[in-house]
Image (cartoon, helix red, strand yellow):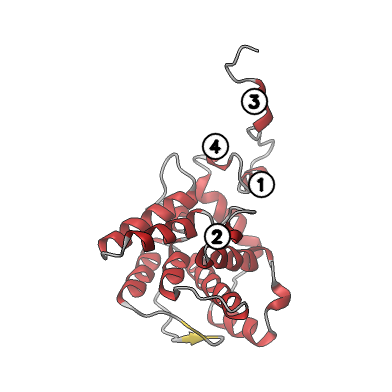
């Protein structure tokens, strides 16, 4: 698997700075072609949403966030006990620290990755966070599909194919946290566990309340 050398797709410039290129190399080294194509589509969809809504955002930080957003699913970056989103965010933080970026930029990237599946919050934060959330939502669930022109959609899918995405994304998600299903408590990835594991028993918030150590 090698880096796609396209400089722009659907009118969106693909960052080619040293930081962007090195981030991409890490994804190619530790990820898969499937995750690579998904990550680039997410960046392009997020950028198109930003352009359509007239938002200013840091394209390089959004790109690095897109590259790292699912790296927490890979064995190289996966922890034994943290949400995969946090693993990816931590990996991006370490990477950006090594490049001497300011702490504000590093924190923004951390939030962008860590919150990319957090419905009801991410869309109300900084543009990079909100756009990442929207790009993921468009690629995974088709949210905002009606705003994507046929020409842009075809150009993006041609450059970064979906490769039976609907069939493959759920087991891809699951492979990243099947060893720590408890990390899906309270978030949408519990649905993945319920889909993949027969008779999966979800931890229940109400049970946590009713069985707390308080005496009353």
Tell which of 123 and 85 is nearer to you: 123
- In the picture of the structure, the residue carrying the numbered disc 2 is 125
Tell which of 98 and 176 is nearer to you: 98
Residue 90 picture location, percent across and down: 38, 52
Q: Which mark is residue 209?
A: 3
Q: Which mark is residue 182?
A: 4
User: Crowding at label 3, few (<14), some or many (≥20) Cα neighbours within 10 Å?
Assistant: few
Instruction: Tally the numbered discs.
Output: 4
Name the quadrant of the C terminus. Answer: top right
Q: Which element is circle 1 on?
A: helix
Q: Which element is circle 4 on?
A: helix
Dot placed on the residue nearer the N-terminal end, 3 or 1: 1
Q: Which element is circle 2 on?
A: loop
Q: State the CA–CA distance, disc 3 to disc 1.
A: 22 Å
Residue 91 picture location, percent across and down: 37, 55
Name the quadrant of the N terminus. Answer: bottom left
Q: State the CA–CA distance, disc 4 to disc 2.
A: 27 Å
Q: State the CA–CA distance, disc 2 to disc 1.
A: 25 Å
Q: Which mark is residue 191?
A: 1
The mark lying in front, picked from 4 and 2, is 2
Q: Is residue 19 left or right of residue 110?
A: left
Q: Is residue 124 above or below residue 201?
A: below
Q: Is residue 13 above or below residue 194?
A: below
Dot placed on the residue nearer the N-terminal end, 4 or 2: 2
Dot placed on the residue nearer the N-terminal end, 2 or 1: 2
Residue 55 picture location, percent across and down: 55, 75
Q: Residue furthest right?
A: 146
């Amino acid at each position: 698997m090698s880096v796609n050398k396209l400089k722009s797709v659907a009118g969106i410039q693909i960052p080619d700075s040293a930081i962007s290129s090195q981030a991409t190399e890490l994804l190619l080294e530790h990820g898969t072609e499937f995750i690579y194509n998904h990550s680039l589509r997410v960046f392009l969809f997020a950028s198109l949403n930003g352009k359509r809504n007239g938002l200013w955002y840091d394209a390089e930080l959004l790109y690095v966030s897109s590259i790292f957003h699912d790296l927490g699913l890979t064995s190289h970056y996966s922890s034994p006990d943290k949400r995969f989103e946090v693993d990816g965010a931590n990996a991006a933080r370490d990477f950006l620290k090594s490049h001497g970026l300011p702490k504000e930029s590093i924190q923004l990237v951390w939030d962008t990755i860590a919150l990319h599946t957090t419905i009801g919050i991410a869309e109300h934060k900084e543009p990079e966070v909100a756009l990442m959330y929207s790009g993921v939502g468009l690629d995974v669930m088709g949210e905002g599909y009606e705003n994507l022109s046929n020409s842009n959609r075809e150009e993006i899918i041609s450059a970064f194919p979906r490769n039976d995405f609907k069939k493959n994304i759920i087991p891809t998600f699951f492979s990243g946290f099947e060893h720590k299903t408890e990390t899906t408590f309270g978030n949408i990835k519990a649905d993945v566990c319920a889909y993949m594991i027969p008779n999966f028993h979800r931890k229940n918030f109400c049970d946590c309340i009713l069985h707390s150590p308080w005496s009353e």
